[in-house]
Structure formats: structure tokens, C-alpha cells
Amino acid sequence: MATLYDTLGVPTHATDEEIKRAYRKAAMKWHPDRNSGAEEVARATFQEIKDAYAILSDAAQRKVYDAVYAEQMRSWEAQHARQQKAQAEREAAARAADEAAYAEMVSLAMRFADDGHNRDVLFGVLLGRQCEARRAAQIADSVSALQASRREAAKAEAEAEAAEASEVSDVSAQSEATSVKQDAARHGAPAGRANSGKREEPAAETHPAGVLEGLWFQFLNGLRF
């Protein structure tokens, strides 16, 4: 908001002498006789300068003007603040609506991606829902990349679990084989040591039937003599 002080180019606290010097300088600059070819503009500006000086050079009129101007400034500032608040509220509402629409489009794309559809299908679906082409392409690209990343992560995790299970199985098999060998060694070693220094005897001498047969043979021989 331009003021009379702005017209003369002086601050609001300018002295009477400063106002007079500013008026003379502005009047010489914008006098119609000094602005050949732009007389109309110069004449209008020169008149504004004269009106401003007429008020500001008079102490009583200047006081009234300052009071009225201060009231106008307060009113203007209040109105400006209301306008700014309303504008901020409109912008916030627009952002909220835009964010909600964006979230809805992303959710829609994710749902189709989960069903196995590729990027082009996602893009077409979003366009069909009146999504702006640039935003639809951005969402389709992002969702497709995210789904691909998830699939790769799931595949890597499955491969890691399979490798771990195979490793555990191998270790278990090796442990079982070692246990079997240890059991065989514990049960077989004493029998081997006991048999290593013992002479094998004929079956007839060791078996009870063989012993009886020998005794019976000796009895018969005794009867013979």
C-alpha cells in the first residue's frame, strides 16, 4: 500500500525540512515541462506529489493522515492475515485431498501387483481411474520395482533356508555315522583282544556232547580188558 510518504520518497518520521526538500526534488523531476513526450504521466505524477506535500507539510493534516493511515494499516493487516489464513487452509485441504487420492492410487496398484500383473497393466488401471498420466507412470514404476524387490528377497530367503536345512542334514548324517563307528569300536575291541591269544579247540573237545562221547569210549575200552 503506497503512502504519501512513499510518493515523496521519505520515511514516516521525516522532519518538515526533509519533506520540503523531497517535494522540491520530486516536483522538478516530474514537472510536465521536463518530461517531453510523456506529459500525461508526468502531469498525473506531479499532481500526486503536490497533494502529498499539501497534506504532509501541514502539521494538523499530517496528524490526521497518520491516524487514519495507521487505522487503515491495521485494517489492511487484519484483512491480509485473514486472507493468508484462508489461503493456507485451502492449500492444506488441497494437499490432504491430493495425498488421499495418491494413497488410493498406490493401494490400487499394489492390489493389482499382488495379483501378478505387470507394470503396463498397473499403468493402464491407474489411467482408467482418472489418474494423471505422469503420476500413473510414477506409481506404476515404483510399485513394480517394490514387488520385484520383494520377490527377490523372498527367493533369497527360501534359498538360504534350503541351504541351511541341507547343511543341518549333512551334519546330522555325519554325526550318526560317527556314532555308529564309535559303538562298533566299543563292542568289537574286547572280543578281538580276548580271541587273539586263545587257541581254537576242536569242536569235540569243547562241546558237552563230545566230552560224553569220549568218556563212553574210555568205558568201553575198560570193559574190553
Image: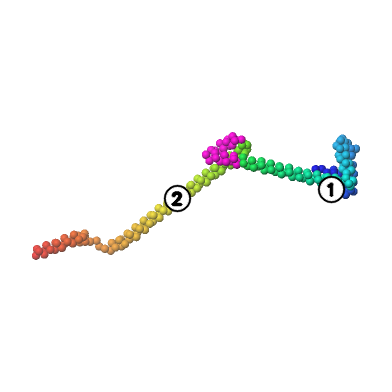
Q: Quadrant of residue 188?
A: bottom left
Count residues near mark 1 (Cα–Cα under 10 Å), then give few for <14, some for 14-19, many for 20+.
few
Q: Nearer the viewer, residue 193 or 53?
A: 53
**Which quarter of the rendered picture does the N terminus lie within?**
top right
> Residue drawn 48% across and 49% down?
160
In the picture of the structure, the residue carrying the numbered disc 1 is: 12
Which of the two discs, 1 and 2, sits closer to the camera? 1
Left or right position of 222 against 162: left
Q: Is residue 41 above or below residue 78?
A: above
Left or right position of 163 against 118: left
Q: Residue 165 — which label?
A: 2
> Residue drawn 36% across and 58% down?
182
> Residue drawn 34% across and 57% down?
184
Q: Is residue 141 magenta?
A: no
Q: Main secondary structure of the magenta part?
A: helix
Left or right position of 220 against 81: left
Mark before the other along the chain sequence, 1 or 2: 1
Q: Residue 155 — which label?
A: none
Q: Which residues are magenta?
A: 102-130
